[in-house]
Image (tube, grey):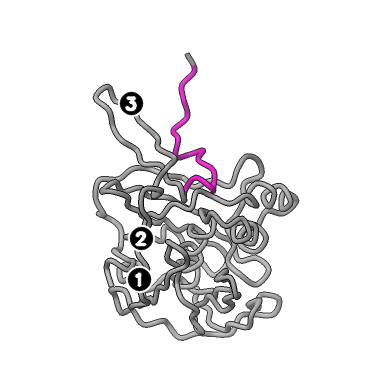
Amino acid sequence: MDEMKPWWKTWPVLGVAALLVVLALGGGGMILSSKLGEAGGSESVPASPSSGGSEAAPAVPAGDGEASVCGLTAREDELGKLETEAPVTEWESLGNQLVTKQNDEHGPGVVEDDGFRYCYARTPEGVLFAAANFVTFGSSSDGNLTSKAAQKLIDAGDRQEEFEAQMKEGGSGGSAPIIAYRVDRYSASSATVTLVLEFEGTKVAGTLDFAWSGGDWKVRAPGTGNVGYRMEKIENLAGYVPWGVANG
């Protein structure tokens, strides 16, 4: 029998938001539940600052040809305090999910009438906020939001239409709150962000690669296959920075 690939290495983008709780069984097997969050979503939560109080490093304008799509001017070339201290963050509800509020320094700089948001600064905070909101839109049951996510938040090159078709039907609408993060790699041109989501006590870490493209942070799509999160079940938050409404 062929060896099965680890599920977190191949799970498509619409699945992270359906994160699929992993339950260990006696024989070492797993149950993957694609109904994450359907039994009950997160309650509407007023915007509130999260834990952590890191101050942004001095901002410098983006260079020619690298300007933000909505005119945000902040740029940082190193990770700085975000490696160990969560940024001050305001959250707001969008349906039964949570997104970061409009932020004139780090983004999102554009919030549309339906709640979709984009345009993040070339800063560690900018790419972290982009990752959090991408997870929300990628899992939304609103096909309009997932379609916009494919259009504006994924750097897919020649595969752009393919990904838009994949995502236009919407995701599961499941709600699994973000509880922590880790920025694995950061520069002003690319970054790798891992977010920890939790559902009924199960913690799953999902990793996304980003590239600065077209004046915004966008998820870097692979040359073949689905846009995927590299996921793994974790037991605790060692090595991660607590972040999210629960830590506010």
Residue highlighted by disc 2: 42
User: Which of the two marks, 1 or 3, is nearer to us in this view?
Assistant: 1
Q: Within the magenta stretch, is there residue 10?
A: yes
Q: Amino acid at mark 2?
A: Ser
Q: Residue furthest top?
A: 1
Q: In 3D space, how far apart are the residues under numbered discs 1 and 3 (Cα atoms)? A: 36 Å
User: Which of the two marks, 3 or 2, is nearer to us in this view?
Assistant: 2
Element under disc 2: loop
Q: Earlier in the sequence, mark 1 or mark 3?
A: 3
Q: In 3D space, how far apart are the residues under numbered discs 2 and 1 (Cα atoms)? A: 8 Å
Q: State the quadrant of the C terminus.
A: bottom left
Query: What residue range appears in magenta?
Result: 2-16
Dot 1 crowding, Cα within 10 Å, few <14, some 14–19, many 20+: some
Residue highlighted by disc 1: 45
> Does residue 134 appear to the left or right of 85 in the view shown?
right
Q: Are marks 3 and 2 in contact (CB under 8 Å)?
A: no
- Residue at the image point whose x is 43% and y is 62% from the top: 97
Residue closer to the observer: 60 or 222: 222
Residue highlighted by disc 3: 29
Residue 234 drawn at (x, y percent): 30, 45
- Residue at the image point whose x is 38% and y is 43% from the top: 232
Give the vertical position of 106 relative to 176 (above or below). below
Q: Amino acid at mark 3?
A: Gly
Q: Earlier in the sequence, mark 3 or mark 2?
A: 3
Give the vertical position of 173 relative to 189 (above or below). above
Number of numbered discs present? Answer: 3
Q: Are marks 2 and 1 in contact (CB under 8 Å)?
A: yes
